[in-house]
Amino acid sequence: MISKKTKYALKALIYLAREYDRGPILIADLAREERIPKKFLELILLALKNAGVLQSKKGKGGGYYLAQSPREISMGKVIRTLEGPLAPVPCVSETAYARCEECDDEWSCGIRLVMKEVRDAMAQILDNATLADVLERIEQEKQKKDGVLFYAI
C-alpha cells in the first residue's frame, strides 16, 4: 500500500494539474480544497519541489505549481519519489537491487519470478498514467455517474 504521504501528494498533484493554467496555488487553498493537513502538505510539496516535480513562487501571487505539463508527470515518478522503488522485494528492483540473504538460487526462485511480474505490471501501469490521464479518467467516471443518475430519474 502507498503511504498517506503519497496519497496526499497524488491528491495535491491532481488538484494542481486541474488548475494548471491558473498559475501558482497557495498551500492554504490546496490544503483546504483537498482536506490535507497544512503542515503535512508543506513537507510533501517541498519534497516534490526538491525532486523537480513542482516549482514555487514567493510573494504576492505565489504558491506551488507543476514544473511540467500534467501530460509529462507520471504516477510512477511521484510514487518512486516518495516511496522508493516499486519492487515488492529487493531482488527485483531495478534501482535498489539487493540479493535476498535467504535465497540459495536467485534465478530460479519462485518468489522472485512472480514478484518481478508484479513489479513490471505496476511499473507499466503507473509509468503510463500521467496526471492528465487521471484527470481524463475522473471526467469519464463523472460522466458515467451523471448518465446513470440521469437515466435513473
Image: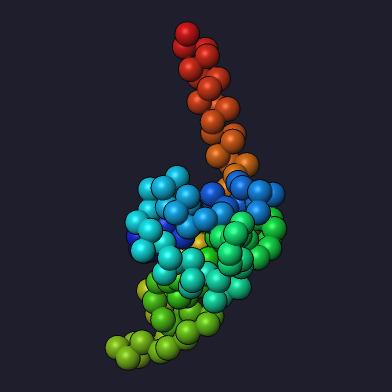
Give whichever of 109, 48 is nearer the camera. 48
Q: Quadrant of residue 56?
A: bottom right
Q: In which quarter of the image is residue 114?
A: bottom left
Can you see residue 107? Answer: no
Question: Which residue is at a point 41% across and 69% down the rendered structure image?
Answer: 43
Give whichever of 40, 124 is nearer the camera. 40
Residue 148: x %, y % from top left: 50, 19
Q: In this view, does 103 lie above or below 130?
A: below
Q: Is residue 136 above or below residue 96?
A: above
Residue 122: x %, y % from top left: 51, 62
Q: Is residue 27 above or below residue 98?
A: above
Looking at the image, which residue sits at the far front?
60
Looking at the image, which residue sits at the far left?
102
Give whichever of 96, 130 is nearer the camera. 130
Can you see residue 21? Answer: yes
Image label count: 0
Q: Colour scheme used in the picture? A: rainbow
Q: In this view, does 18 lie above or below 48?
A: above
Q: Quadrant of residue 60?
A: bottom right
Looking at the image, which residue sits at the far top?
153
Question: Which residue is at a point 32% across and 91% down the rendered structure image?
Answer: 101
In the image: residue 20, left or right of residue 111:
right
Residue 126: x %, y % from top left: 55, 60
Question: Which residue is at a point 38% across and 58% down the rendered structure image?
Answer: 38
Question: Which residue is at a point 52% across and 82% down the rendered structure image?
Answer: 95
Q: In which quarter of the image is the N terminus?
A: bottom left
Give whichever of 129, 23 is nearer the camera. 23
Residue 86: x %, y % from top left: 47, 70
